[in-house]
Image (cartoon, rainbow, N blue to C red):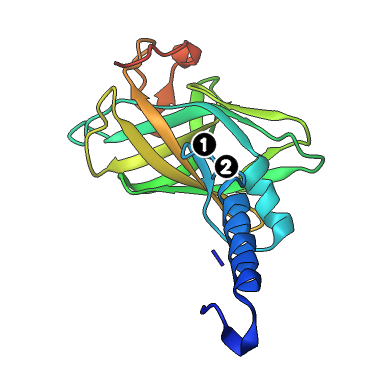
Amino acid sequence: MFSNSRAFGAPISAALKLGAVGLTALALTACGPANPSPSATPTNPGSAASESSAQTLEISDAWAKSASQSDEHAMTGIFGQIHNPTGQAISIVSATTGVAEMVELHETVMDAKGNTVMQAVEAGFEIAPGGSLILQPGEEHVMLMGLTQDLIAGAQVDFTLTLSDGNELAVTAEIRDYKGAQETYSHEETSPENSQEPASGN
């Protein structure tokens, strides 16, 4: 991919021309499109059609709340915005990371007593054609449980989203201190105030 001057009686000038063509091809290859941003990179090969679903998802402001693995619950959440610019729905069915023993897709709902509680979204998150999914505290988010290391503000955490077509999207999120309500990220009651904006960690 990516000989000698008189082979088979070819004149020197012909060999030089062939060499020039080869150099031109290499130059054109070097000028090809750059790799996807490391903050959102498709990781599964698959078919061209399914690859495009992962490649076209636009992820912005991905961040995770800082947390310690020594905390009582050792849990935290990942947030951000995911836009689907295609003409078909795209579903995120699961997520994984190397910094937690378990990862779930969560939503926040009201229980029978009127309390705000979190629960796993077994069917995953579907993003409509041209629509966006906003992951934020107090609403949909990616839940990390059983942290295996501290998540310190200013650092980054890598995680992978798996789509319904089997393709995967590697994402890097900034870790930030959360200055809003001090939610616990457990399956216990949470506060509606969790929707407040986080502060960037430096």
Q: Nearer the viewer, residue 79 or 105?
A: 79
Amino acid tagged 1: His
Question: Left of 29 or right of it: where is 171?
Answer: left
Question: Which residue is labeled 1 in the image?
Answer: 106
Q: Nearer the viewer, residue 59 or 199?
A: 59
Residue closest to the far right: 87
What is the x, y in percent for residue 18?
A: 63, 68
Residue closest to the far bottom: 8
Q: How many marks?
A: 2
Mark pair 2, 1: CA separation: 5 Å
The answer to whether residue 155 is visible is yes
What is the x, y in percent for residue 110?
A: 57, 24
- Which quarter of the figure is the C terminus placed in? top left
* Residue under the point 68% across and 40% down: 126
Q: Earlier in the sequence, mark 2 or mark 1?
A: 1
Disc 1 secondary structure class: strand
* Residue under the point 39% across and 10% down: 180
The answer to whether residue 111 is visible is no
